[in-house]
Image (tube, helix red, strand yellow):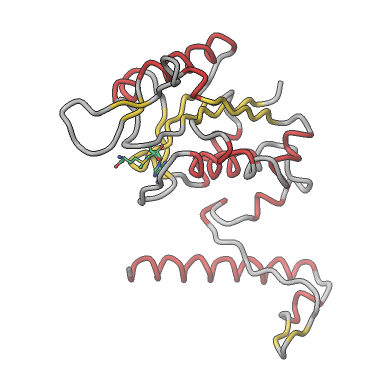
C-alpha cells in the first residue's frame, strides 16, 4: 500500500502545480505515494459554504471555523487510519531533515492548511497530533508550507529517487552540508572544475568530497554563531 497524504485546503489550486511535476509526479506515477487534495469548501456551512467567522473577543481577522474542518477530518478518518494529523502553523515544530526522514517512513498523514488568523484553537487542542512550521515568518496560507513539507517527505520515500543513494548525500543527512557539484564544460569564463573530479580516482574523489563537506559544515556553523 502506498503512503497516503491527504491535504485539506480552502484553495486547492495553490497546491496542484507544486505537487504535479518532476519528482512529485513521478512518485505518484510509480504508485509510491498517493497525494489527495480535499477542498474544504465542500464541507462549508450554508449556501455560501462558509468556512470562516469573526473572532470571539473581537479583533482584526477571521478565524477558520471548527465545524467544516472537523467534518472534513472525520470523513477522512472514516476511510482510513492516519499516523499524523498535521497542522501547518508558524509556531509549530520547525521542519528539518530529521522530521522529513521520520515522516517518509510513517503511515498515512493528513495535513491541514490554515488561512486568515488560523484555525479555531479547539482543533489544535483536541484533534491535531502534530504542528509543523517551515520557518519563523508568516505566510498568508498553509498551502505553500504544506507543499514544502510534502516535497521534502515524498522524495525520501524508498524508490522515489531514481538513485536511492542520492538523498543520503544531500545536506543535513548526518548533519553535514553537501559538497560542491559541477558539470560540463570543464572550463567556463576562465573558471575551472576542480582537477580532482576529472582524475577518475574514486577514492581520492570520495576523500575530497568528504573534506569539502566538512569544511562547508564548519563554515556554516561559524557563520551561524556570528549571527
Ligand atoms: N495568526 C497566525 C499567527 O500569528 O501565528 C498566522 C496565520 S497565517 C496568516 C495563516 C495560515 O498560514 C496559518 O494558519 C498556517 O496554516 C499558515 N502558515 C503561515 N506561516 C506559516 C509557516 N511559517 N509555517 C507553516 N504554516 C504557515
Residue 214 in picture, x, y percent from top left = 55, 66
Left or right position of 39 against 56: right
Residue for point 59% across, 13% down = 80
Q: Residue furthest left?
A: 57
Quadrant assignment, res 132? top left
Left or right position of 7 against 208: left
Q: Nearer the viewer, residue 46 or 204?
A: 46
Residue for point 59% across, 28% down = 37
Residue for point 29% across, 21% down = 122
Residue for point 40% across, 22% down = 50
Quarter in which the N terminus is drawn: top right
Residue 12 in picture, x, y percent from top left = 56, 34
Q: Nearer the viewer, residue 199 or 43?
A: 43
Q: Residue furthest bottom?
A: 190
Residue 193 in picture, x, y percent from top left = 73, 80
Left or right position of 220 against 171: left
Quadrant assignment, res 35? top right
Q: Residue furthest front?
A: 47
Amino acid at each position: 500500500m502506498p503512503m497516503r497524504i491527504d491535504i485539506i485546503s480552502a484553495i486547492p489550486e495553490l497546491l496542484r502545480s507544486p505537487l504535479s511535476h518532476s519528482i512529485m509526479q513521478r512518485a505518484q506515477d510509480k504508485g509510491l505515494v498517493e497525494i489527495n487534495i480535499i477542498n474544504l469548501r465542500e464541507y462549508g456551512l450554508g449556501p455560501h459554504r462558509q468556512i470562516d467567522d469573526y473572532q470571539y473577543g473581537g479583533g482584526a481577522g477571521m478565524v477558520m471555523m471548527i465545524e467544516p474542518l472537523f467534518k472534513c477530518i472525520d470523513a477522512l478518518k472514516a476511510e482510513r487510519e492516519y499516523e499524523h494529523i498535521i497542522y501547518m502553523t508558524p509556531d509549530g515544530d520547525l521542519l528539518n531533515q530529521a522530521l522529513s526522514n521520520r515522516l517518509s517512513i510513517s503511515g498515512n498523514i493528513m495535513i491541514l492548511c490554515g488561512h486568515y488568523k488560523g484555525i479555531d484553537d479547539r482543533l489544535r487542542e483536541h484533534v491535531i497530533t502534530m504542528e509543523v512550521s517551515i520557518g519563523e515568518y508568516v505566510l498568508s496560507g498553509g498551502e505553500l508550507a504544506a507543499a514544502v513539507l510534502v516535497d521534502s517527505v515524498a522524495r525520501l520515500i524508498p524508490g522515489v529517487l531514481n538513485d536511492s543513494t542520492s538523498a543520503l548525500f544531500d545536506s543535513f543527512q548526518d548533519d553535514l552540508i553537501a559538497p560542491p557539484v559541477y558539470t560540463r564544460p570543464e572550463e567556463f569564463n576562465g573558471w575551472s572544475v576542480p582537477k580532482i573530479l576529472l582524475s577518475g580516482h574514486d577514492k581520492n574523489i570520495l576523500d575530497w568530497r568528504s573534506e569539502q563537506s566538512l569544511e562547508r559544515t564548519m563554515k556554516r556553523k561559524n557563520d551561524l554563531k556570528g549571527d
